[in-house]
Image (cartoon, rainbow, N blue to C red):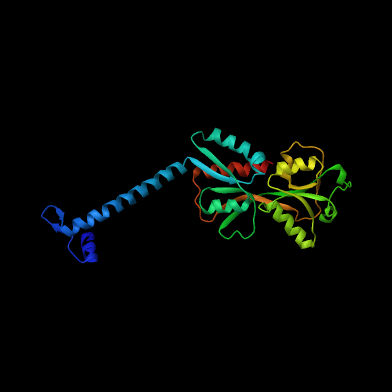
Amino acid sequence: MQIKELEDQVGMRLFVRHAKSVSLTPNGRILFERTERAMRDIDDGFQSLADIAAMRQSTVTIACAATLAPKRLGGVLTTFRRRFPDSSVRLIEAPPAAALQILERQVAEFYVGPSVSDLKTFTFEKLANEPLLACIPPEFDQGRDRLWFEDLKEFPIIMLDQSTAIRTLIDNITYRKGLTLNVAYELQNAFTALSFASAGLGVALLPSIAIEMSDFDGFRVVPFREPEAAREVGIIAEKGYVQHNYSEQLMRLIRAAFAQS
């Protein structure tokens, strides 16, 4: 039936039927020679996909916010390696916007980081609330135990750049309040922001995790009064993406680590 369908499609005989075998006609030989390479390429393509799938079963690639990786994931990855010695984990540090592109391209299984708005094609599993804190050097410290954003408008401010979720959070709060802060330094790295605050260059506004993992001194850490001055942290994955066994196991360890913190 398949032979007949193929001949009907091209409008000519391609095969000569014998009692116990089938051979190609001259036109069938031409078609075979023209399509043999294409069929071999298709077979090679399927084999490459099979190789990738086999590798994916033993390698987990995840993305993570830079502020979360050192404090939250170090111990998790150590535990994972001990429990599953035949597997490996590849970690990509990325801000949320870049992480979503990584997930769309299926370079990573999932992302551990702050939530972002308008997650149309992604799911978000909340793991924790992470407050925003101010690191205030002595020369700018007025002794308040909690701050309103208005309390900082006269001081030089140290913030992370606009690719980060914490910067989006701050910009949303100040926009709602009609407030403009004096941003003296706009940085990519929380470690640099903490070092600048420690040197007395300004008040650094950072997520709590970034301050927990540092050993800087020279400033006092003060929370905010605004209830919205916190970000949700969790696991972002593409809708419908099927996690394999190792990535599911790693997710469980991450959930447990956040539950204990």
Residue 222 horizontal side relative to residue 76, left or right = right
Residue at the (59%, 48%) spot, across then down: 111
Return the residue found at the far right: 142
Residue at the (62%, 52%) spot, across then down: 96
Front-most of 1 and 136? 136
Front-most of 238 and 205? 205
Q: How many numbered marks have been drawn onto this rendered protein structure?
A: 0
Residue at the (68%, 54%) spot, across then down: 162
Return the residue found at the far left: 19
Residue 236 locus on image (x, y percent): 59, 52
Residue 226 horizontal side relative to residue 240, left or right = right
The N terminus sits in image quarter = bottom left
Q: In which quarter of the image is residue 136?
A: top right
Q: In which quarter of the image is residue 22?
A: bottom left
Residue 152 horizontal side relative to residue 8, left or right = right
Relative to 261, say whether 181 is above or below.
below
Residue 139 locus on image (x, y percent): 87, 44
Residue 206 locus on image (x, y percent): 74, 47
Residue 126 horizontal side relative to residue 241, left or right = right
Front-most of 125 and 106? 106
Residue 110 locus on image (x, y percent): 56, 48
The C terminus sits in image quarter = top right
Relative to 253, say whether 155 is above or below.
below
Residue at the (53%, 48%) spot, across then down: 109
